[in-house]
Image (cartoon, rainbow, N blue to C red):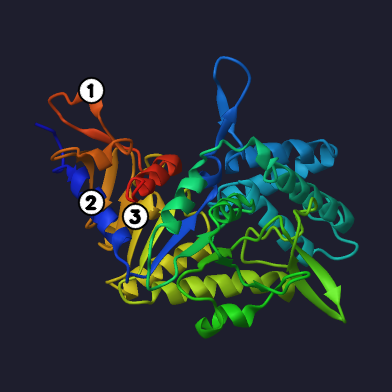
Amino acid sequence: MTSGPQPHDAHKTLSDLRDHLARHDKPIAFLFGAGTSCSVLIPSGAHGKQQPLIPAVLGLTASCKKDVGALGEKFKAAWAAIETRCKDNTQDPNVENVLSRLRMMLSAVGKSDTLAGLNPAELMNMEECVRKTIARLVTPDLKQLPADFPHSKFARWLAKTSRKRPVEIYTVNYDVLIEHALELERIPVFDGFVGCYQPFFHADSVRRPETMPGANWARLWKMHGSVTWRRVEQNGHVRVIRGEPDAAGEMILPSFQKYDESRQQPYVTFTDGLTRFLEQDDALLIVAGFAFADEHINNLIFGALENRPRTHVYALQFEELPEDNILIRRSFQRSNMIVIGPDTGVIGGRRAKWAPADTPSFMHGVFQLKNGGAAENLGVMKVGDFACFCSFLESMTPG
C-alpha cells in the first residue's frame, strides 16, 4: 500500500482530458510557453546526443547575459544589479524580467542621469543587445526541423477535428514554429493582422468576433510579440506589421510595460481576448510549456477560475513544482484548476501521486509505471512534455 494521500487515477484523468478535447461544441483554447518550443530536439554532436532547436528561458538568459557582458565591465555590472533587483522583488531574474526592467529604466532615466551605472545611451545599447540575442536564438533555420516535430502533430490533430467554435492558440513564444506547423497542414489562421502587401495589426478585428473568420480557422494570438513583427511609420501613423523575421527583435514584448501605444496595443488586445475566452461558460484552457511567470496572465487565469466555476484549466507541467509555487498554491484553492505534473497532480484541490486502475493503449507514451509496476503501482505522467502531449493528441485522430 502507498503512504500519504490516496493516489489520483491517471487513467481517469487522461480519459477526462480526452473527453474534453473531443467535444465539438466546447470553447477550447491552448496557452503555449517556452517549453513547447524547446521540446523540438535536433542532433548535437556525436553519440546520438540531442539539444533543443530553440533554447528554453534559462538558455536564452545565459546567452543574453554573456552577450551583454561582452559589451564591457560596466554592462556586466549592470546585468548583475538588475538581477539583484529582480530577486529583491521575488522575481526570477530571467531574460524576460531583465528586459522588462531595462525598459522601465529607459522610460524613467533622465538625459543626464544614470541607472545601474549606465547612461540612457548605454541602457539603450544593452536593451538592443538583449533583443538581438533573443531574435537570433529564436529564429533558427527551419530546415533543421525534424520531419515529425511536435507542433506538426498538434497541427494534424487540429486539422482532423470538426468544431462549432474556433480553436484559439495563445502563445508567449517569439518564434514561428506553431505558424510553420499550421501552414504545413494548410490550416487557415487568423492572427489579428489584416492586409496583403504588409499585413498590419488591426485591434478592432480582434475585439469584435463578427469580423473574424469562422470556426474552420484557427486563431493565433502571440501575446509577447514575434520576431516577424516590426514597427513602421505610414502616413504619419506608427503601425505594427508582420513580415520576415526581424533580426533586431523590435517587437519582443516580454511584459505589460511598453514603450508606447503601438507596442502596447497587441499585448492589451490579446490579454483582453483571453479574458473574454475564459468568461465563456464551460470554457477549457490547456496550458503547456508555460511556467506561470507572467503575473498579468496569471491574474487573468486565476481571476476567471474564481468567477467562473464552469471554466476549467489543465496545467500540464514538465517538472514537479514545490508546494510554495504560485500555481500549486492557487490550485489548492480552485477545484477547476487541474495541475498534471510527472509525479503528482492537483485535482479537486488535492495533491497526490499517480496510480492507474489500468493502462489502455491511448495512455502509452504519456504514462509509465514506476519500477515496472511493482507493489506501489505508482507511475510517471509524461503528458507535461509537449512532445508527449502532441503524440497523445495525434492518437485521438484516425490514421
- Total marks drawn? 3
Q: Are there few (<14), some (14-19), or many (20+) residues within 10 Å of tag 3?
A: some
Q: Is residue 250 above or below residue 83?
A: below
Q: Amino acid at mark 3?
A: Arg
Q: Nearer the viewer, mark 1 or mark 2?
A: 2
Q: Which mark is residue 371?
A: 1
Rounded to the nearest angstrom, the CA distance separating label 3 from label 1 is: 30 Å
> Which residue corresponds to mark 3?
329
Q: Is residue 219 above or below residue 100?
A: below
Instruction: Compare marks 1 and 2 and give the one earlier in the sequence.
Output: 2
Rounded to the nearest angstrom, the CA distance separating label 3 from label 2 is: 25 Å
Q: Are there few (<14), some (14-19), or many (20+) residues within 10 Å of tag 2?
A: some
* Element under disc 3: helix
Q: Which mark is residue 318?
A: none
Rendered residue at 64%/51% (across/down): 175
Location of residue 118 in the rendering, given as x and y in whole percent from the top left corner:
84, 51
> Which residue corresponds to mark 2?
15
